[in-house]
Amino acid sequence: MAITAVDLLEKNFLRVEKDSSISQLIGKMISSKQGSALVFQGDSFLGLVSKRELARKKIVNASKIKVASVLEAAPVLSSDTEIEKIAELMFSSGARVLPVSKNNEIIGIVSALSVVNQINSFPEIKKIPVKLVWKKPFVLEENSTVAQALSMMREKNISGIPVVDNESFLKGFISIEDIMEKFFLFPKERDQGSRSGTTTKSTGFSAEKVPIAKTPVKNEMTESVITIEPHENLLKAAKLMFSNNIHHVVVEENSQVLGIVSIRDILSCFAKKESARNIQIANFPQVDEIDRAKIMGSIFIFYDKIAMVFPGEFLLHVHFKEHGKLGTRKKHTVHLKLVLAGKTVVASAFDWKLLTAVQSAIESLEREARDKIKRT
């Protein structure tokens, strides 16, 4: 029997209103130990917000910015969506949780961890050696600063970094979620000094203060790193992630970091391949992995929506064009062509932000497709 969303359903999830502030949201994330929140306006689901994306957005004043300004689009699962499809949607959208709807009401979520926990049901996956999927890790020396860690995460589009000493021995792990919480919720200057056993101040530290950005990562990292040896398989990696509620395991041998396996690496093994959809893409620009996942996720969500509304074979063309360079920025044009039921529907959009151009073109094409079908 196929595993579906209802089998993986988690009814406890973090819910916030779109008019909440970012600082209120992060406070709720920390108290509930949730890395993502579902955003609503009344009873209407609007999208997701995750700690990872908040950290990437360089928010200056979290108490004044509203959640509505940082929404991430997310596909909505039905209760009978099968696990392979769930994994595919998570992989393509970059989301670690997806909402589940029944009778137009969000009834819960499915998490990436609950998906990978089902690896036992897939013999062809669980035996895959981690050495076939791990990625070469970026590492930080333990005296590097938090600012350097955050800069590397943003530049390399990663959400966690192993920390090593000057002999390259593994000492800890620092995640973008940990950094984000400290940057957004704590003062920009933190106490640093010796503990005082007699003080009555709430800080419990002596007077010296340093900016958090200059704090060494060794002061903020998690020392108890979850590791795996290179000869182990994905079943072991998945079990470690699920039992420790983490999204990375470090591949280590003799205290040397060899690689890192992320939950996305395991999801990719579950997911159906892109070729299952009849999509032709031309001139895809060079973007980072996270932005590519968001763009492809938007395209996949649109394709699957069309497939549900208009059953039968169809073809989607996506053509990208870069032009109008302004400094390091480029204007992007996205052309879409949908060949559906013997008819061709086209739409275009342009913007300085590639994802915005894609989403605008998709919205326009969806309207055109519905209007054209209605007229026939």
Image (spheres, helix red, strand yellow):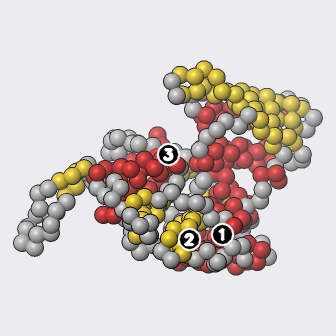
Find residue 204 and report its horizontal and vertical position in percent: 15, 66
Find disc 2 in the rendering and name its residue.
251
**Circle 1 residues within 10 Å: few <14, some 14–19, many ≥20:** some
Q: Amino acid at mark 2?
A: Val
Q: Quadrant of the C terminus?
A: top right
Find residue 341 and report its horizontal and vertical position in percent: 91, 38
Q: Amino acid at mark 3?
A: Glu
Q: CA distance from mark 3 to mark 2?
A: 22 Å
Which one is earlier in the sequence, the residue at label 3 or at label 2?
3
Q: CA distance from mark 1 to mark 2?
A: 9 Å
Q: Which mark is residue 131?
A: 1
Between 146 and 264, the one nearer to me in the picture: 146
Q: CA distance from mark 3 to mark 1?
A: 25 Å
**CB atoms at circles 1 and 2 under 8 Å apart?**
yes
**Circle 3 residues within 10 Å: few <14, some 14–19, many ≥20:** few
Find disc 3 in the rendering and name its residue.
155
Find residue 375 and report its horizontal and vertical position in percent: 85, 29
**Which residue is at 16% across, 62% downward?**
193
**Which residue is at 19% across, 60% downward?**
192
**Circle 2 residues within 10 Å: few <14, some 14–19, many ≥20:** many
**In this rendering, would 279 be left or right of 151?**
right
**Which residue is at 51% across, 24% downward?**
327
